[in-house]
Amino acid sequence: MTDYAAPLRDMEFALRELAHLDEVLALPGFEDAGADVVASVLEEAAKIAANVIGPLNAPGDRQGSKLVDGVVKTPDGWHEAWQTLVDGTWNALPFSPEWGGMGLPHVVNTAVQEMWQSANMAFALCPMLTQGAVDAIVENGSDALKALFLPKLVSGEWTGTMNLTEPQAGSDLAAIRSRAERDGGRYRVFGQKIFITYGDHTLTENIVHLVLARLPDAPAGLKGISLFAVPKIKVDDAGTLLGPNDVRCVSLEHKLGIHGSPTAVMSFGDNGGAEGYLIGEENRGVEYMFVMMNHARLSVGVQGLGIADRAYQQAVSYARERVQGRPAGWTGGKTGIINHPDVRRMLMTMKCQVEAMRALAYEGAACIDIAHHIPDPARKAAAQQRYELLTPIIKGWSTEVGQEVASLGVQVHGGMGYVEETGAAQHLRDARITTIYEGTTAIQANDLVFRKVLRDKGAGIGALIADIRDLDADLAARPGEDFAAIRRALAEGADTLAGTVACFLGNDNPALPAAGAVPFLRLAGAVVGGYQMARAALAAARRLGEDGADAGFLNAKIATARFYAETILPTAQGFAHAATAGAAVTMAVDEAQL
């Protein structure tokens, strides 16, 4: 497995040219987060990713986490790596100084998270979920609960988990059976949860589990579920550790990938009830948990980006070194397979989609910063609407594409890609989970179609399509066939997306958009990715006119954007047909004939 090196130049380009970083840094609350601070943060994070977290990826995959005599042991080096994050207050990056945070923009934290996920996805799941737990408590917890848990969670001295799934209740949260009982001013929680990432470990002295459970007198369904903070080790009102809570890890799952990450079956209340604290009000737990879930959805989208970039870096390195045959039309001496046209096609397919995913993830993160900090109510509302629209696309599209890019990485290696020692196979195995956890691709697609398109009658996605079309004049003003080709493909993609939206809006059969939701998500991702690549090409062309411009880097941006326009954007038509005509025949075969 090749070493990971953060693509800082590409990340800086995406942050400044596509994710409105300068605008974000000018928002109220970010006065101390200047460009020099951001540059320093990214450079130091890159060093940690390359020198601390990255080298543990392959060994951690081979060793895995294990449950030994009731104690979960993470791979060698995990504890020291976590302490590096704690010592550097890296977990505190996006949080308020009120709780010990650094107060930096979410978009900067997203870039750092990309590095962690690329370097070692199994390890990076722990800080990812801890940050989500902080968000949920910040937005919904009482002042006393915040004071009790936030300082340690923000610092990373404690970690956090998300406890939703049960053996009989996967995505159907209304079916959960975990229960809670009132006990004075606190609660006792009982039940079993499965698939709990970092549900137990010894990296920190305490773990705060966010658990969905139902009170005895709660109404049926989703409206009768409450959310509780249940620490592994009980604490007093001052936060002092007392003794073990009634919480234990029953077993660890044996998984296809992310072996270093302990995925636990957790049992609460086997001996009288696990002591817990109500978050917010009773019976509003699902609403509160969605704060953490939406954080996780964006973060898992970044995982799709991160694992794709790692697979791409490794494929490029191998293709440079591997000499095999003579490329078609090649007139030089011996050369790596990187100059075989089909290998180049695969590498360009990987490269262009990685860049599109990065731009999309960073824009979504910037929308969060703008929505939370800008004083203008209209711009605040527009940013919130855009963030909500982009969330299922970032999660669903980026993870599906990330999985495909990781698969291409194996293909570039040929037979050696199927051999574990090269490391390419691990990226593919690790990528597979991203389309499943935190809501499958179908769940993201249904959220996009039913909640983000049909519910507001296409207003939000209509505004996005309008922004895409507004780029036409800028593209038309640029000379050369590169921009002409990008312009044609983007216009066709926008029309295809708009036409499919109109088809869904004009349909009165709910089964049609349900059957066509995933192809629609893929269509939206391809087009929005093309929009980001077109913006990148325009930004590169502008920078080419500056003194000291890196012509090679910037011209590659334009060529990569055209490759996306010529090879990825045309898939929009196929996805549109599948989302409409294909969806209409999805249920045509009798169940007995399947």
Image (cartoon, grey):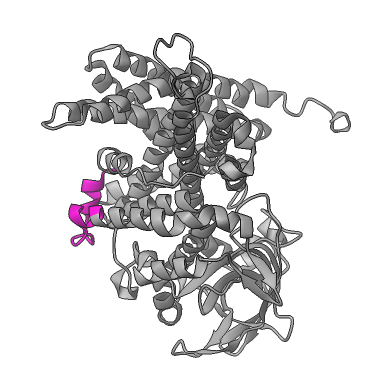
Vertical arrangement, residue 500 with respect to residue 295, above or below: above
Q: Residue at x 35, y 53 (%)?
A: 46
Instruction: Please provide percent x and percent y for residue 374.
Output: 25, 54
Q: Quadrant of residue 177?
A: bottom right
Location of the C terminus (image quadrant): top right
Left or right relative to 80: residue 33 = left
Q: Is residue 148 above or below residue 522?
A: below
Residue 266 can be seen, yes or no: no
Residue 58 lies in magenta, yes or no?
A: no
Q: Nearer the viewer, residue 545 or 294?
A: 545
Residue sitting at 47 percent across and 20 percent down?
567
For the point 50% across and 14% down, the residue is: 326
Asked whether residue 35 is drawn in magenta, I would say yes
Magenta residues span: 19-39
Residue 22: tell me if it is visible.
yes
The residue positioned 38% from the left and 46% from the top of the image is: 5
Of all residues, the one furthest to the right in this rendering is 592
Q: In the picture shown, does residue 291 fall above or below 538?
A: below
